[in-house]
Amino acid sequence: MSLPNPWNLYNLIGSPFFQGILEASDHPTRPLTLFVGREAELQRLLRAIVGAGAHSTRHAIAGAPGVGKTTLVQELKAKLIEDGYFASADYVPVLSTDTPASLFLRILASVYEILLLARPHLADNRSMQEAQALVRVHRHASANLSVSVAGFGIGGGGAQNVQIPADPIAGGLGILRDLFALVRTAGARGIVLHLNNLENLTDAEAAHAADILRSLRDFVFQQDSVHTLIVGTTDAVQAAVNQHAQMRSVFSTVAVAPLPLADVHSLLRARYAALRLDPNEPVGLPVDDAAVDTLYAFYRGDLRGLLKALEEGVGASLPFGAAAPAIGAARPALTLGTILPILQDRARAQLTMELPSRASYLTLWGTSDPTALHTQASLKRLWKISQAAVSTTLDEMTQTGYVVRVGTKERAVLYGLSGTSRLIFAG
């Protein structure tokens, strides 16, 4: 049972505007049953994977930040599990510090864990024990070092001396192939590998990730019955997955567009219903539809940003203590006129704190035309600073979330104000 909180005033267990990824269908506050929309993308991916039979498939899921890519993949994996595939809610992160060996070992660990989750009795299998030993040892020791691993390794009994190979990929290739074979002999239709975190990489790191992914292509992503999903922003997917012809030729890219406004309203209604505190009482709308419509336009499909704004704006407007009305009392939905000033004050204070020396440049952009898209060349003219200063300023603004990359024009990167920035400069 949840503790009393201000959201109870609307007959809600908690905030319906959470930004976390939906989890298993029995999760108490973020069940996958709240998934809304994306039917076309789901059907395209399901047809490709199921239609491949015993062969492998590879898909890059691309879209703007916060658009719902990872949640789409969570729903896809849930449907594939129902259809006889092995998968888990977790994903393999692609990290800025990765080497081919480190990413390979995390993939090996993920395959092991997926198999163990789906078929616990496989824990005693020789290949499973070898996989567990290799991953454990590499997490705690350096190359060419012999260590004792209690309870792990071939045979599974007692302490074992496990020799770490100088090249963990060469040492683990046979083990990984054996695990993939186990997937088939265990009665599964295939196994799903989910790689994520590309959007947190810099351009240079994404280019480095492209080389690593290419190096793993043949002996990981193209193995029979293996279905790989790599998730990231459109720019990150382009840099990390589609940069090399060897990857472009085997990966298909699925573009995830912004969730339509009608689906956003359906999503919120589904959350209100699922989080109802007293099933015998109606849920009061925390915010009216017109406010959602306006904020949706600011955030241009960034669902995560929209939900965060709603949570902050509505949450800060909820009454506390003696001022709070009784649960079940009639309360009008909050309007944009109530929550927008709160959001603007917070965002302006945050901007001044995060970009004290750059806020004036963002203000110049926002007050001249907040809808304008700019290249570095046009911003150099607008800001009247050097090219190097433009580049540095944009790096800081994108890293702090006030500016986003929205595409290219004649090979030049196009930048636009984020939803938070457009909110700041709204009239």
Image (spheres, rainbow, N blue to C red):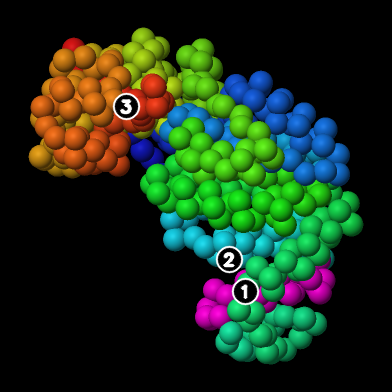
Q: Residue 329 vs residue 386: left or right?
A: right
- The residue lying at 29 percent from left, 25 percent from top is 375
Q: Earlier in the sequence, mark 3 or mark 2?
A: 2
Could you tell me the amino acid type at mark 2? Answer: Ala
**Badge 1: residue crowd in 10 Å (few <14, some 14–19, many ≥20):** few
* Residue 215 visible in the shown view: yes
| Residue 180 in the image, given as x and y percentages of width and height | 79, 57
- The residue lying at 72 percent from left, 44 percent from top is 227
| Residue 329 in the image, given as x and y percentages of width and height | 36, 19
Q: Residue 305 vs residue 348: left or right?
A: right
Q: CA distance from mark 1 to mark 3?
A: 42 Å
Q: CA distance from mark 3 to mark 2?
A: 35 Å
Q: Earlier in the sequence, mark 2 or mark 1?
A: 2
| Residue 214 in the image, given as x and y percentages of width and height | 61, 51
| Location of mark 2 (residue) | 101
| Location of mark 1 (residue) | 167
Magenta residues span 122-143
SS class, disc 3: strand
**Mark 1 touches mark 3? (CB < 8 Å):** no
Could you tell me the amino acid type at mark 1? Answer: Asp
| Residue 109 in the image, given as x and y percentages of width and height | 64, 63
* Residue 282 visible in the shown view: no
Taking 346 as reference, is 111 above or below it? below
In magenta stretch: residue 135: yes
Q: Residue 170 vs residue 36: left or right?
A: right
**Mark 3 touches mark 2? (CB < 8 Å):** no
Dominant secondary structure (helix, strand or loop) of the stretch shown in magenta = helix
SS class, disc 2: helix
Quadrant assignment for the C terminus: top left
User: 94 and 324: which one is in front?
Assistant: 94
Tell me the tag on residue 396: none
Tell me the tag on residue 415: 3
